[in-house]
Image: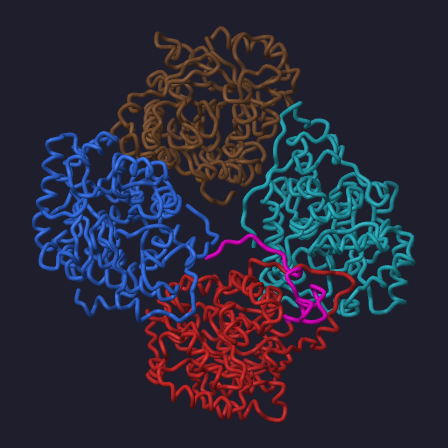
Chain colours: A cyan, B red, C blue, D brown
Amino acid sequence: MTFKELSSVQCPDDFEELAEKVLPPEVFAYLKGGSGRGRTALANQDAFLAWDLLPKLLPGLLLDSTSKGNVGMNLCGVGFSSPILLAPLAHQALYHPEAELAVAKAAAASSTGMVLSQWSSTGLADVASILNNQSAAQSPLLTQMYFLNNQAHNLSLIESFHSSGSQAIVLTLDAAIQQPSMDAMRAGFVMPKNWSNTHSMAGAVGIADIEWLLKNTHLPVMAKGVLSAKDAILLKQIGVQGVVVSNHGGRTVDGVPAALKQLPAIRHAVGPDYPILFDSGVRSGYDVFKAIALGANAVLIGRLQAYALAAAGALGVGYLLKILNQELTAAMSLCGCNTLAEINADCLQSVHILER
Amino acid sequence: MTFKELSSVQCPDDFEELAEKVLPPEVFAYLKGGSGRGRTALANQDAFLAWDLLPKLLPGLLLDSTSKGNVGMNLCGVGFSSPILLAPLAHQALYHPEAELAVAKAAAASSTGMVLSQWSSTGLADVASILNNQSAAQSPLLTQMYFLNNQAHNLSLIESFHSSGSQAIVLTLDAAIQQPSMDAMRAGFVMPKNWSNTHSMAGAVGIADIEWLLKNTHLPVMAKGVLSAKDAILLKQIGVQGVVVSNHGGRTVDGVPAALKQLPAIRHAVGPDYPILFDSGVRSGYDVFKAIALGANAVLIGRLQAYALAAAGALGVGYLLKILNQELTAAMSLCGCNTLAEINADCLQSVHILER
Amino acid sequence: MTFKELSSVQCPDDFEELAEKVLPPEVFAYLKGGSGRGRTALANQDAFLAWDLLPKLLPGLLLDSTSKGNVGMNLCGVGFSSPILLAPLAHQALYHPEAELAVAKAAAASSTGMVLSQWSSTGLADVASILNNQSAAQSPLLTQMYFLNNQAHNLSLIESFHSSGSQAIVLTLDAAIQQPSMDAMRAGFVMPKNWSNTHSMAGAVGIADIEWLLKNTHLPVMAKGVLSAKDAILLKQIGVQGVVVSNHGGRTVDGVPAALKQLPAIRHAVGPDYPILFDSGVRSGYDVFKAIALGANAVLIGRLQAYALAAAGALGVGYLLKILNQELTAAMSLCGCNTLAEINADCLQSVHILER
Amino acid sequence: MTFKELSSVQCPDDFEELAEKVLPPEVFAYLKGGSGRGRTALANQDAFLAWDLLPKLLPGLLLDSTSKGNVGMNLCGVGFSSPILLAPLAHQALYHPEAELAVAKAAAASSTGMVLSQWSSTGLADVASILNNQSAAQSPLLTQMYFLNNQAHNLSLIESFHSSGSQAIVLTLDAAIQQPSMDAMRAGFVMPKNWSNTHSMAGAVGIADIEWLLKNTHLPVMAKGVLSAKDAILLKQIGVQGVVVSNHGGRTVDGVPAALKQLPAIRHAVGPDYPILFDSGVRSGYDVFKAIALGANAVLIGRLQAYALAAAGALGVGYLLKILNQELTAAMSLCGCNTLAEINADCLQSVHILER
């Protein structure tokens, strides 16, 4: 797919259609689906429809200032040129032969932060070498971690994060229960054999495990999979430096709340200065704007990343990031926000929708 | 259907599809349908969608402890190894040649409580002999009762309950008005001729009838078909030992409330210690969890039982019970509940849905 | 259609399907449709779905007492054996050659009150002679009236009501704006030529007109087409003896409220003793029960009457009335009501639906 | 299309279907669509369904008085014979060869106010000469303006407004972000080459620009595109003489609120005497009535105008205006309003709908 062909893509969702054309049906079904009947996965997207953008005409639209890219931000001491980051997605070779390398190239080219999955199809060192070039400050590398049943393995994992130049650890807590969607299973999807390593994941990560991790790394640790204010408060109390509000894109138990719905209460609970990342259901730069307005500092892009990767490799991911950032700045212009800090709930207006 | 084939069943609802394949169309229509247009039957299921499960990450998921089966409970002095019981379903020969015997075998094999219908296709003694073996404590037998117009018949019925080893009587109060769904009637369903005994049911069971029953049995009596707090309070006052919150699976008058919707107010009215069973609309172990969180002590499985019975006899019912219990413990793990007693409304979050 | 064939009718709505088979398409489209896009006509029916029946088990279901027909009532001094009355429908020759005579026969045979339309296809005297036989007290005749532009005509109309034995006048106030549904017009429906008399209707009936009528008749007058509490209060103040809460079955301007939705506030405004009739959207005896629970004394049956008339003449209307009354008493039994006076809002529970 | 054929048009929406038949598919898709997925464009229409008309029977329907056309009003010192005005639509040659000239003819013939777009396909002078004849007071000309990047061009534009007899300037503020709907782009729609002048629009109109305009014209200025009370208050404070509550028919960023939803709060904020025009989503004279009841002084007709223009040129637009005014007076009769001033929120009743 050439860049010219890509220009026919009008919105991020168009990548889903393109991905469906190139992926084996069972892989696409797995990628698209949430667990069970996919109710939570749908609810994640619907939750964004519960908010309209409220335009602000005066003192004058801000197209120029925001289109200059004034969307830089700092999270846990790491600087990013945009609040739109690439989410950790396992085993990307499922979607494109270049896998995580293609994503890293797009991240480096577009100065985007990337969170690499522990179950990467590509070695951490290879990905890091792409991101950690001269312009490393522009495309920070973060590393996602599952707790394994073997503490020695956990230690060597942490050491690999340190040596690779990772700037933060994203510890996933919500993956104990996961299964492909019924659609995917009916389409014949089976986990690739080399995913067997996932069996070594610790079933239940406890407070002691997290405290152990905090003692064994100098990197900031963010806990991923938080859906309740209680959990967020507890994680903050034990020293975790930030949380990722997420329901794993609807991939854990079907029937948990839409992630966006939980965001305001969690922000309220942890206070204005505690770092919050968000994912689950983001399908446009307008959605990014809404998540920030409701309390997120930054947003992880998951399924869209895989769709764009499948459709056009590094080029696709790069183009996706371009559109998402354009949409974000368009929303900022519309609502009169010069900087990310000016985005707040007053920019939104609630809409009466049904939930699924 | 072999056990291997059964393993393709991914969720309890899959048994509905399997049952549709093997049952005569009019029998399936009768089994599936509620009365009238089936609005209440649909509302029963939808009511569960009005609640999401709220995950609790810390102090650590509890997969191991709950998967060890710590879901025992006591109801009216009877001990059960799980809060998932088999509902009284009339004339099961409609669904499988082994009828209630197959269900009893599954109950005994899986240590599940079973409530036998008064209009059983199989003799009470035969069913009891399967359940009342050495491990009787594991698969308690309860017996369901309709009041008949003939008091002598009622007495001999009670005596048969006593002699069979029944541990409780479930007295059905809501069956005065019942008819097959319009779909079933249009599909040509007619009540089997030997159902004519149902004509001997007393049309209106009153307080005096219930008091008579209480005097003539030493067994605990639970009243089935309660949908309002007022009825529950009155039943408790006259000495009934428990209630079954139920709308007969939507089989009485179409247009009564979803049973789950009524549950919290009834629990509030009778206090925390009064036994409440629940049925109507349960389609998964997650639903069982929700019913318990909203006030039930235990849950009766009706249509799913018949679907599984039709699909694969005792094997099907046993496999159904296995999945339901797995889903229940998965929900407990997700929400941080070590025991049934820890399941409460804080584990749920309301969802804005439409009702039918 | 024989009575045996009729017994395949399982609910009143089944008559709609039967009518569709026998009526010319444009006539059926006219009969079924509301004005415009039919939104109000649909809303009329949906409004009933906003209420569930709340069963009452104790002190015991009342099937027997109510099935004995204890549903008599008195309205404006007229006694009726059931609160289910036949609505005034214009030009019934459109639906069946026997027209209003067939309806009157059914009314007489089933002891039902009938309101004859001013634009009857059949002469008032002929209809009256059927109803005013020995058993006249059982099938009271009421007459519906439009104000004409010619006062002499109005006077002679009133005199014909008096001489025919009419026991009350139902004055329609909401017919100034009416047109067939768009579907009916597209199906080619045109008002029959002899409907040209409708052009002589007074466009705007005012207070002075109503007061004139009250002075010129000894009969009680009920005003039809009331949707607001303000209008009801004003009508009561000027001496009108009752109101019919109705939006003309959705046949005036499309986009007025569902009639049932307006009923509780109107009952509240006029007090418990003021006569209120209700129509618009009633499709079952359960709906009749709901309208009474929300404030109506009795209910007029419009479209269903025409469907049954079209399907099977007097036999059809009679069978319809039988089913409606059975459903009403079934609802009374279910909710523990011995008499109409015991039907109230506590028998219902609100449901969260969408309106159209 | 002859006038006789037009008489088959039963409601304004019928023009949409007719337009679809005569326009090239991509032009129709552009005209019909909102930006993006068209959610805001749909929400605009749905917002009207959130309100029913509440009929008022007494003291008597007002068909005659209102049908005499007592709907005159005054806006910013300009007199209009109806509150239904023609909206500024760019480049109408897309829809009909006579373009804005046909619309002007219809306006003059029906004594309707017309707002001419700055990007008119027809010269301002030619349009003005049609409207500014003897009966000019009956069809006032207003002119819509975009700020250009070149102040000299802005000045000459204002001078052309003055010399043409324009009676007010409608300054559009919400056009910085606009794009055709995805459907239109997929249908191959591209902006006509001569639309390139739109590139000279100033991206961001600020307070200083508006103040400059107010100093350089004696005409009243109304600001178009207001969706928030804050913006309306600020515009009033700096001396703008009125606002147009509008989201550009859903053509800016998809996902802003339905315009009608914002109207009551804006009216409340600016007080009862400040001029408010409204557009976005109006599809009938009943909708016009609702917008007035919720706070508008008058309403602009956009898409319907183009549909009628495409279907039948001046004749179509004239007939559309006739129907719209008939529906408006029918609603006034129904709700007991003798004049526009009597139309208020008490004439409406809220309906529980979903938003998109």
Q: Is residue A17 left or right of residue A81?
A: left
Q: Is residue D148 above or below residue A204?
A: above
Residue D312 lies left or right of residue C307; in this view the side is right
**Quick check: can you spot residue C182?**
no
User: Which residue is depicted at the point 48% across and 67% down?
Assistant: B231
Quadrant the C terminus of chain B occupies: bottom left
Q: Position of residue B313 (x, y in %)?
A: 51, 83
B273 or A119, nearer to the observer = B273
Identify the residue at image location x=45%, y=71%: B248
Q: Residue at x 47, y 15 (%)?
A: D142
Say which of D254 and A94 sits in front: D254
Residue C223 figure quarter: top left
Counting from the top left corner in percent of width and height, residue C236 is at: 29, 39
**Image vertical order of residue D216 relative to residue B19, above or below:** above
The picture quadrant where one finds residue C113 is bottom left
B30 lies above or below C186:
below
Q: Residue B91's x, y, as percent?
A: 42, 82
For residue C47, side relative to residue B100 (left or right) = left
Indicate whether residue B346 is drawn in magenta: yes
- Who is closer to the viewer here, D171 or C333? C333
- Whether residue D265 appears in magenta in the rendering, the answer is no
The residue stretch that appears in magenta: B327-356
Is D24 in front, or is D348?
D348
Question: Disc count in the image?
Answer: 0
